[in-house]
Image (cartoon, rainbow, N blue to C red):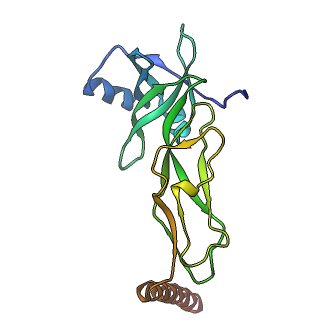
Amino acid sequence: MAKPKLTPLTATARTEFGKGAARRIRRAGDVPAVLYGHGTDPQHVTLPGQETFLALRQANVLLEINSEGAKPIMALPKQVQRNVITNFVEHVDLLIVRADEKVSVEVALIITGEAERGSLVNQDLQSLTVLAPAVAIPEEIEVSIEGLVIGDHITVGDLKLPAGVESQQEGDILVVNITQPTVADLETEDEEGAEGEGAEESAEGSEEA
């Protein structure tokens, strides 16, 4: 088995709890977090703010939590609380995982390719809940619509999943539907095009002035 890609974070044990303690941690630029799983008692720790923010930009990132005097722990972020204004990470729940187990995660579905010209591509499902090896969670799952025509559709059961990954959602759930654009769709496209042309003309007029 290939060595899993781990993102290291240094954790320090927390001895103070409650809202006041959490606010002090955040004011210092750090993040309060909790490690749990595999029958262990929850471990309350503090993580470095900037490093944690950067690490969590990747969905389902596999972390290596290092703390003084303890063995490294592999963990996945299961719940991330962010400030709605600054997007600063305010709290993280981390699930302890092992290299030989599978975990339930949500993976983004990304459309690739082009369907029939003039058709409308409706993506009904944005992400898929899967059971995947903890050390080989896919960053995304591609959904190819190349060559599809009006009337075609793709369901969860049609998706090609990476080796070792299995869907936890019903196979008949609709992912993508290729349809004929309605009059309303065409009018919306015309309006958007007109707005774009108007903005260009305004910019040209400003330059001439």
Question: Quick one: 120 or 85, which is closer to the camera?
Answer: 120
Residue farthest along the left direction in this orientation: 19
Please name the residue shown 54% across and 31% down the image.
102
Q: Is residue 161 above or below residue 37?
A: below
Q: Position of residue 18 (x, y in %)?
A: 26, 23
Residue farthest along the right direction in this orientation: 2
Question: Quick one: 191 or 1, which is closer to the camera?
Answer: 1
Question: Quick one: 177 or 62, which is closer to the camera?
Answer: 177
Image quadrant where one finds the C terminus:
bottom right
Q: Is residue 129 above or below residue 15?
A: below
Q: Position of residue 58 (x, y in %)?
A: 56, 43
Q: Is residue 201 left or right of residue 144?
A: left
Q: Position of residue 109 (x, y in %)?
A: 55, 55
Toward which corner of the image does residue 144 lie, by quadrant? bottom right
Tell me if I can see residue 208 in this picture.
Answer: yes
Q: Position of residue 51 (x, y in %)?
A: 54, 33
Q: Is residue 139 above or below residue 17?
A: below
Image quadrant where one finds the N terminus:
top right
Query: Across the whole image, how many numbered discs are drawn on residues?
Result: 0
Q: Is residue 43 left or right of residue 147?
A: left
Toward which corner of the image does residue 25 lie, by quadrant? top left
Please name the residue shown 53% across and 11% down the image.
68
Q: Is residue 42 left or right of residue 176?
A: left
Please name the residue shown 50% across and 31% down the image.
76
Tell me if I can see residue 58 in this picture.
Answer: no
